[in-house]
């Protein structure tokens, strides 16, 4: 069964450092998403991406965040200067069409120290 | 602004009994509803969905009911099994609002043998 893969599974970084979280969506999917879940809280929408551009972003997705699909297969989330409150599980997801169900990756646990 | 709410953070049921997980929403534009199941350290896994043109969808032991007038949906699991123990997230999307999924806070289901 096709799956969304995320690397690394766990990333520890120092505050102020840049991190790049990587995702390989399902190959024939066209819509891509990043969500995050701070420990004990709900799964929150960060950004959606379609046709090589951001289609929607939440207020969490400020100037410190960026997404890119550099080579047609990878979909990356970059946090330019990490803060302690960025510590969370980050989930990538993809879908074949808007409004249909998403397939999620297993997540990257980001710990900012 | 919690557009999707799961008011019960946890639920405990005996194996073989019915589990009923509830979800309420406020956005009348939502037209697609989903339930995801999540184990610790894994990404959410799609379980079952329902579109707003239906009021019931069944898949094996899982049935989702939608009451549009009450803006309420529920997931019934019968019979419940210990392997069903996980966090269940309700999610909703509106096709004419970009189609992104909005998640509830989750309900942790514990099925005791």
Image (spheres, rainbow, N blue to C red):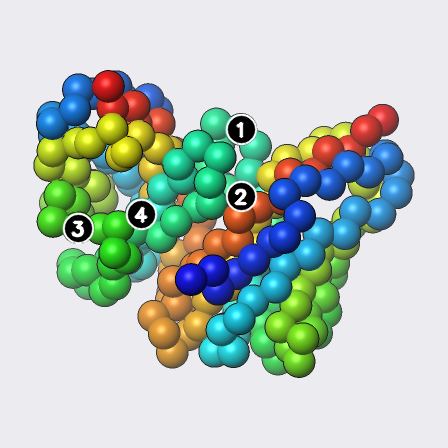
Q: Find the distance from the CA under tag 2 to the CA under tag 1.
A: 12 Å
- Judge by depth and name the residue closer to the eye, A99 or B87: B87
Q: Tell me which chain the residue with mark 2 is part of.
A: B
Q: Find the distance from the CA under tag 2 to the CA under tag 3.
A: 28 Å
Disc 3 or disc 4, which is closer to the eye? Answer: 3
Quadrant for the N terminus of chain B in the image? bottom left
Question: Is residue A108 placed above or below B80 in the rendered structure?
Answer: above
Q: Tell me which chain the residue with mark 1 is part of.
A: B
Q: Which residue lies under the disc numbered 1?
A: B40
Are dots 3 and 4 in contact, CB under 8 Å?
no
Which secondary structure lies at badge 3? Answer: loop
Q: Tell me which chain the residue with mark 4 is part of.
A: A
Both labels 2 and 3 in a single chain: no
Are dots 1 and 3 in contact, CB under 8 Å?
no
Q: Which residue lies under the disc numbered 4?
A: A34
Q: Find the distance from the CA under tag 1 to the CA under tag 3.
A: 28 Å
Which secondary structure lies at badge 1? Answer: loop
Both labels 2 and 1 in a single chain: yes
Disc 2 or 1, which lies upstream in sequence? Answer: 1
In the picture, measured across the screen, residue A28 lies left or right of residue A102, that is left
């Amino acid at each position: 069964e096709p799956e969304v893969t995320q690397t690394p599974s766990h990333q520890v970084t120092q505050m102020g450092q840049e991190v790049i979280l990587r995702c390989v969506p399902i190959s024939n999917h066209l819509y891509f998403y990043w969500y995050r879940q701070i420990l004990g809280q709900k799964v929150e929408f960060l950004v959606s991406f379609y046709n090589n551009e951001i289609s929607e972003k939440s207020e969490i997705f400020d100037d410190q965040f960026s997404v890119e699909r550099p080579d047609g297969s990878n979909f990356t989330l970059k946090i330019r200067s990490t803060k302690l409150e960025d510590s969370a599980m980050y989930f990538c997801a993809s879908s074949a069409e808007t409004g249909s169900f998403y397939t999620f990756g297993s997540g990257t646990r980001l710990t900012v120290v | 602004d919690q557009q999707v709410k799961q008011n019960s953070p946890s639920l405990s049921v005996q194996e073989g009994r019915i589990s009923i997980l509830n979800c309420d929403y406020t956005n009348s534009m939502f037209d697609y509803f989903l339930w995801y199941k999540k184990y610790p350290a894994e990404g959410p896994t799609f379980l079952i969905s329902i579109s707003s043109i239906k009021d019931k969808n069944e898949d094996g032991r899982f049935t989702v009911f939608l009451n549009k007038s009450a803006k309420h949906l529920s997931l019934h699991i019968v019979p419940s099994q210990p392997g069903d123990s996980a966090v269940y997230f309700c999610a909703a999307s509106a096709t004419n609002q970009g189609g992104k999924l909005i998640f509830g806070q989750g309900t942790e289901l514990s099925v005791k043998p």
